[in-house]
Amino acid sequence: MLKYQVVIFDFDGTLIDSSEDVRCSLEYAAEQSGVPAKSKSRIRQIDLALPPRDIWREIGGEESRFEQFRQELKNHYLVLNDFKNTAPYPGIITLLNTLLKKGCDMYIVTNKSFTATDMLVHKLKMQHFFSMWYSPDGPSNQNADKTAVLSRLKEKLGNKNAVYIGDSHTDIEAAAANGIPSIGVLYGDGDPRRGNASPNELASDVESLFPLLCLS
C-alpha cells in the first residue's frame, strides 16, 4: 500500500543529473560577464541549488553585471546547451513507473525556469509520469518563490496525503512551511540538511526511496 497519495519532486539533483550541463552554462555566462578565470573555477565546487544571484556573489561577480550574467546564463542554457550530459539518475525511471502503476499522483516543483523544465521534461520523455510541473516563473505563479508555489499546489490537492522529495535545504524548508513531510536526497547537487533544514527522512540513493515510499 502506498504511503502517500501524492509525491512531489524537485527536478535538478533529485530526478535528473544536470550538473555538468548547468556548470557549462554557468562557466560560459561568467566568462561573458567578466569574471576572472580564478574566480570562475569556483563554479566547479559551488552548490548548484543556490539561486543565480547567490551563485554570482559566490564567484565574486560585480553586482552591476548580474543582469548580464543572468541573461547570458539563460541564453546559453536554453539555446546553446545541447544537454548531452543531462539524464535521469539511475533508478528514477523505475521508481516513477512503479509509482504510476500504483496510482500515485506525481508533480514537479522546482526553482528551475518553467521554459527549461518544460523543455527537459519532454526531451527526456518524462511528461507522462506527472500531472503537472511548476516553477516560480511559470503560468499564474507571477515569480512566486518555491514556498508559495508549493502552497498553491497543496491547496489544489485538498486533503490528499503528500510528500515532497528534494536535494536542497530550500526544498525541505518550503515543505516544512507548508506542513508537508519531506524526504531529503543525498545523491544530488545540494544539501537537504543545510542551515535549519530538517527533512523528515533521508535517502542516500534512489534505491533508498523505495522503502520510504512503501514500494518494497
Image (cartoon, helix red, strand yellow):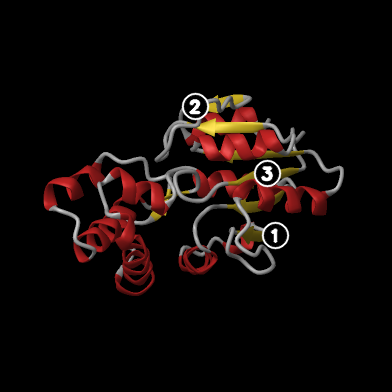
Image side of residue 11 versus residue 138, left or right:
left
The type of residue carrying mark 1 is: Ser
Find residue 207 and report its horizontal and vertical position in percent. Answer: 50, 33
Residue 9 can be seen, yes or no? yes
Q: Residue at x 45, y 31 (%)?
A: 186
SS at circle 2: loop
Q: Nearer the viewer, residue 143 or 213?
A: 143
Reading the image, the residue beneath label 3 is 7
| Quarter of the figure with residue 200 | top right
Q: Quadrant of the C terminus?
A: top right
Q: Quadrant of the N terminus?
A: top right
Q: Nearer the viewer, residue 172 or 12?
A: 172
Q: Residue furthest front?
A: 64
| Quarter of the figure with residue 190 | top left
Numbered label attached to residue 195: 2
Find residue 88 and report its horizontal and vertical position in percent. Answer: 44, 51
SS at circle 1: loop
Reading the image, the residue beneath label 1 is 131
Image side of residue 7 versus residue 34, left or right:
right
The crowding category of the residue bearing disc 1, from other C-alpha atoms within 10 Å (few below 14, some 14 to 19, many at least 20), is few
Q: Residue at x 53, y 53 (%)?
A: 111
- Going from N to C along the chain, the mark reached first, 1 or 3, is 3
Q: Is residue 112 above or below residue 182?
A: below
Q: Residue at x 59, y 58 (%)?
A: 136
Q: Residue at x 69, y 67 (%)?
A: 140
The type of residue carrying mark 2 is: Gly
Q: Nearer the viewer, residue 53 or 191?
A: 53
SS at circle 3: strand
Find residue 15 and report its horizontal and vertical position in percent. Answer: 50, 48
Q: Is residue 170 above or below residue 21?
A: above
